[in-house]
Structures are given as C-alpha cells and as structure tokens.
Image (cartoon, helix red, strand yellow):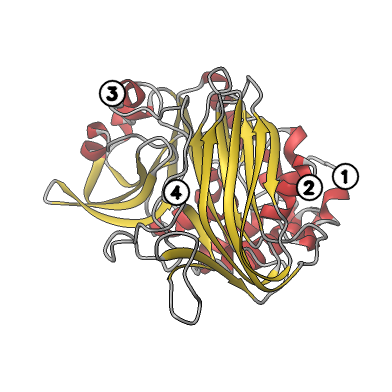
C-alpha cells in the first residue's frame, strides 16, 4: 500500500475522490460561487467536523467558506480538504480542519473580540477567525512563513488581520490587552507574558505539555490568575524561541515506544470532557476503553483494551499517537499488536479496513512512508501481528494510527508496541 493511499484511508471519505481531480486554480476569496472546492468544503464540514462534535453554526460557516487550498503549498493542494495536518515548510504544519474548528469553537469568538494568535503558520487559523471577531493579531517566529502568510491574507482580502514576525512567547504588548488568545503551537507551560496580556475575564486556548503528550486547555483569567479547563488530548508542533529553550523534558528519540499501548491506564474523569479520550492517545473517534468481561473473555494481557465501533461506511474511527524516533540512532523497529474483529466489512474505499499503521516523517515533516499491520477482515478472535520496519536515516518522528479507518463493524486492539532492533 502506498503512503498516499493509506493517508487517504486514514483521513478522508471516499466521496473526496472526485475532488482530487479538480484543477488546482487560485480562486479569489470573494468568488465562492465559482470556487470548484466549495463542495469539498461542504463535505468536510458535514462528514468530518460537524459529525465529530463541532456545533457552533458561525464556526462551521467560516470553515465552509475559508479557502484552505490557498494556505497550503501547491504540492499539497490535492489534500487541502482532507481532515489532516499538512506540511507547510520550515518544519511546520497547517493543523487539520477539525482541530482548527474545535479550537475556534472553544475560544467562543464574539464580534467585538480582539484576538491574539500565537503561531500564524500558513495564516489559515487567522482566516477562519477573521469573520467571527473584530480583529486578529497574529505572530509567527519563522520569518519566511510569517511573510508568506501576510501576503496570502492580504491577497485574499482579510483586512482585519494584522501579522508580525517575532517570538510568540513575548506576545504583542502594544496591542494588549486581548479579549481572547489562541495558541497554535505547544509550550511546556503557559508563557507569563501571554497571561499578562490577557484581559481580566478573557480566555486563552492553548495546548500545553510534553512534546508528544499534550492537552488542549481553555484558560480563563479570574482575579489575575488562570482557571484551567482541560478540553482534549492533542498534538501540536512545539513553541520555539524562549519557550523551547526553557523546556525541561525532551523526548528520547533513540528509544521510541508507545504510551499506554496496552490501554491499562484509565482516564481521570475530571481530566478531559470528551467521551473518546484514551490516555496517551489523541483525536479519538468512535473508540472506547473497555474492561474484559466474562462474555468477551480476557484480552492478551491485563484487563483492558481499545474497542472501535462504526456502522456508517467511511466514518472516522481511530486513535493517533505521536512518537519521537531518530533515524540516525534507530535503524529498525518491530511493530506489534493484537487484534480481534467482529463483522468487519471494508468501507467504500478498497483500503478502508482495520489496521495498525505507523507513518514516518523527516525534520521538515515530509512523509517518508507508511507501514501497516493488517488490514483485518471479518470475524476473528485475538491474534498477534508484527513486522520489522527499516527506519530511513532522515526520520525524526512518527505518527501511530489504530482503528477501523472507514470500515464498519467492531475491532478491538491491545498490546500495541514498538521495539527498537539494534
């Protein structure tokens, strides 16, 4: 299976196939009626964003009308309306449309809000916010990205967006205070200057945590202090500059491993307010952490496992996990897992089947290949599966994916692991 085909299986619905053959035209922002991507955006909103829980009609409409294809490199335009992060150069990515929509909704934007965005990237998040608020101030630390985003936003007519190249850790003091702050890169802890620049009663949406284990928070400033509300596990590129210099814990890329691959770690009820939360993993869809029962029989080890269930062909059902892996240190790994299936049928796409997949990326987050266990079909009891994978020297990180990927039925997974082979 090719990398492109697996990526499509993981992130798209088959109905996008027709969209991919459309010509890659540059469409002005006000020419929505003549935009050949309009139907693709409508499908994206209906099948990947609204179905995953985003409800605010203003946010959905903004995603529906924001030309994401204008904010990605030409080489990525065929994937612009798939629900996936994409490389934009300089080791940075444009976030998936779902996470942009979810963060925008969590920010609770009001027409009178002045919003500070940390991490302009391609400019897409600022463009989505633009029709929802009074003004967006956006900072990007990478000069080339910041300049490109500025040019794109100006060309498309986003007049209420101001951009600046600088260290987002320091904020934008001469435009403060801000009603809302949205951070699209992850520091290990909340930068103090951003707290100071948030008005009393204001809110900040920010991913915080270790490099590959982060939580998205809503922070509300009350009496000068922050009140935290955990929203969901997530994965963002790190905040660079002062934030990265102060980071205390770095991942061990020479010894890659899976966090909670046996699913024995249970969620604390107060940690995140989403049903599909499995500790150590993020972006869960139609998944539950299960405990073994007499009827089910024991899992391969311990008492817990992950269950994916889906009755709608093509609908997402998966878990993801980011992993540090350095191809200069690691030349080969063994990927393992146990799988049990019941009444599994492939989705509309020929490759829409349960699998365990690992995708490798270089320092610029360019795709180096995807390797899979599976696909798994029909009904079968617990069975182990494994394969050796040679790691390209350019590898710097990986994304592990587990789930049904558009298939229908039920698939259980347990004992998912990565072993370094010297």
* Label pair 4/3, CB-CB below 8 angstroms: no
Q: Position of residue 316 (x, y in %)?
A: 63, 63
Residue matched to label 2: 5
Q: Nearer the viewer, mark 1 or mark 2?
A: 2
Q: Where does the N terminus fall, quadrant-wise?
A: top right
Residue matched to label 4: 234
* Label pair 1/3, CB-CB below 8 angstroms: no
Q: Nearer the viewer, mark 1 or mark 3?
A: 3
Q: Secondary structure at mark 2?
A: helix
Residue matched to label 1: 23
Marked residue nearer the N-terminal end (4 or 3): 4
User: Which residue is depicted at the point 39% across and 59% down?
Assistant: 108
* Numbered disc total: 4
Residue 27 appears in view: no
Give how far apart the Cα atoms at labels 2 and 3 are: 39 Å
The residue most toward the bottom is 295
Looking at the picture, tell me which residue is in the foreground, 95 or 402.
402
Looking at the picture, tell me which residue is in the foreground, 149 or 242.
242
Does 174 sit above or below residue 408? above
């Amino acid at each position: 299976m090719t990398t492109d085909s697996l990526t499509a299986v993981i992130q798209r619905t088959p109905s996008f196939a027709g969209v991919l053959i459309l010509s890659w035209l540059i469409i002005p922002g006000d020419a929505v009626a003549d935009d050949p991507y309009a139907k693709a955006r409508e499908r994206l909103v209906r099948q990947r964003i609204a179905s995953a829980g985003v409800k605010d009609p203003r946010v959905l409409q903004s995603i529906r009308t924001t030309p994401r294809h204008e904010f990605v490199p030409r080489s990525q335009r065929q994937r612009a309306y798939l629900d996936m992060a994409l490389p934009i150069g300089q080791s940075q990515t444009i976030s998936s449309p779902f996470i942009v929509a979810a963060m925008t909704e969590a920010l609770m934007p009001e027409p009178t809000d002045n919003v500070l965005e940390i991490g302009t990237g391609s400019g897409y998040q600022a463009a989505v916010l633009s029709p929802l608020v009074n003004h967006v101030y956006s900072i990007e630390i990478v000069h080339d990205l910041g300049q490109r985003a500025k040019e794109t936003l100006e060309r498309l007519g986003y007049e209420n967006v101001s951009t600046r190249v600088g260290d987002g850790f320091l904020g934008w003091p001469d435009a403060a205070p801000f009603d809302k702050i949205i951070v699209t890169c992850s520091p290990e802890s909340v930068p103090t200057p951003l707290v100071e620049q948030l008005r009393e009663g204001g809110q900040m949406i920010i991913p915080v945590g270790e490099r590959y284990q982060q939580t998205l928070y809503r922070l509300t400033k009350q009496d000068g202090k922050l009140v935290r509300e955990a929203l969901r596990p997530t994965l963002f590129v790190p905040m660079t500059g002062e934030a990265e210099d102060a980071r205390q814990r770095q991942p061990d890329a020479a010894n890659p491993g899976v966090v909670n691959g046996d699913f024995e770690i249970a969620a604390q009820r107060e940690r995140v307010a989403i049903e599909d939360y499995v500790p150590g993993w993020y972006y869960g869809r139609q998944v539950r952490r299960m405990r073994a029962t007499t009827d089910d029989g024991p899992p391969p080890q311990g008492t817990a496992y992950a269950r994916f269930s889906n009755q709608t062909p093509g609908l997402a059902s998966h878990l993801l996990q980011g992993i540090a892996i350095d191809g200069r240190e690691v030349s080969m790994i063994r990927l393992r897992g146990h799988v049990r299936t019941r009444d599994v049928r492939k989705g509309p796409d020929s490759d829409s089947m349960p699998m365990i997949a690992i995708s490798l990326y270089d320092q610029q987050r360019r795709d180096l290949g995807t390797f899979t266990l599976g696909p798994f079909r029909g009904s079968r009891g617990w069975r182990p599966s494994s394969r050796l994978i040679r790691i390209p020297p350019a590898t710097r990180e990986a994304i592990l994916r587990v789930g049904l990927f558009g298939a229908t039925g039920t698939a259980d997974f347990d004992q998912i692991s990565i072993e370094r082979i010297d």
